[in-house]
Image (cartoon, rainbow, N blue to C red):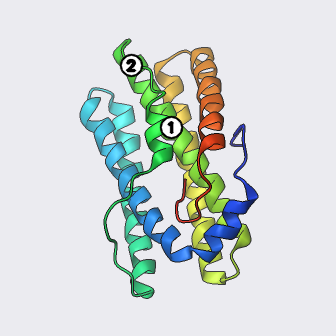
Amino acid sequence: MLGLKLETDPRWADIASKSLEDILLDHAWCEQKAASSGISLIIIFPEYREMVDEVTEIVAEEWSHFERVLGELKKRGLHLGKARKDEYVIQLAAIEKKGGSRDQQLVEKLLLSAMIEARSCERFKILYEQLENPALKKFYYEFMVSEAGHYTQFLTLAKKYQPENDVKNRWAEILEAESAILKNLEIRGDRVH
């Protein structure tokens, strides 16, 4: 369903399951950044009413995810701590095409958001399948389903503002670029991406 060109290295699951507290810390920041990214879309492109309505719902859901992950951290006696650089997202942002019409600019941001949601969905699926704790399995299953929904929502929105064929072609380019990024990133079990 996700169409990712490169699956996560199986070693990530092993490392992540041994660094679950670090994953939860990073996951909290990922949810906060997802909410902030949605707010930025609304601020930058307020004239796109349908996008504003849909992304507002995503922002609310991402913020509730942030609160849920904070709850898991508190159960473990952990605190949020400082935000970490997300090298994956930094490199993905570098492939964003600049310029063009307002529609093209919006679609580019929607597609990059879809990419991040797709990779998050894949990682949460791995955690759901690999973790032994039933409560955490359920926790990550619910996040996996939500991220899949956001991924499809961003892609569907993109197709409202550009011809479907243009969106498909650009999505294929982003998938290839993301695969190259992932291939060259260090495998770290303390990061969602």
User: Label 1's element?
Assistant: helix
Residue 154, labelled with which disc? 1
Q: Which residue is drawn at 43% across and 87% down?
A: 75
Viewer-proximal residue among 164 and 123: 123
Q: In this view, does 75 lie to the left or right of 137?
A: left
User: Label 2's element?
Assistant: loop
Residue 184, by quadrant, is: top right
Q: How far apart are marks 2 and 1 (CA)?
A: 19 Å
Residue 61 can be seen, yes or no? no
Q: Which residue is drawn at 42% across and 79% down?
A: 73
Where, quadrant-wise, is the N terminus in this rendering? top right
In percent of width and height, residue 115 lies at 55, 39
Viewer-proximal residue among 155 and 48: 155
Amino acid type of the residue tagged 1 in the rendering: Phe
Residue 49, by quadrant, is: top left
Residue 185 can be seen, yes or no? yes
Location of mark 2 (residue): 98
Of tags 2 and 1, the one toward the viewer is 2
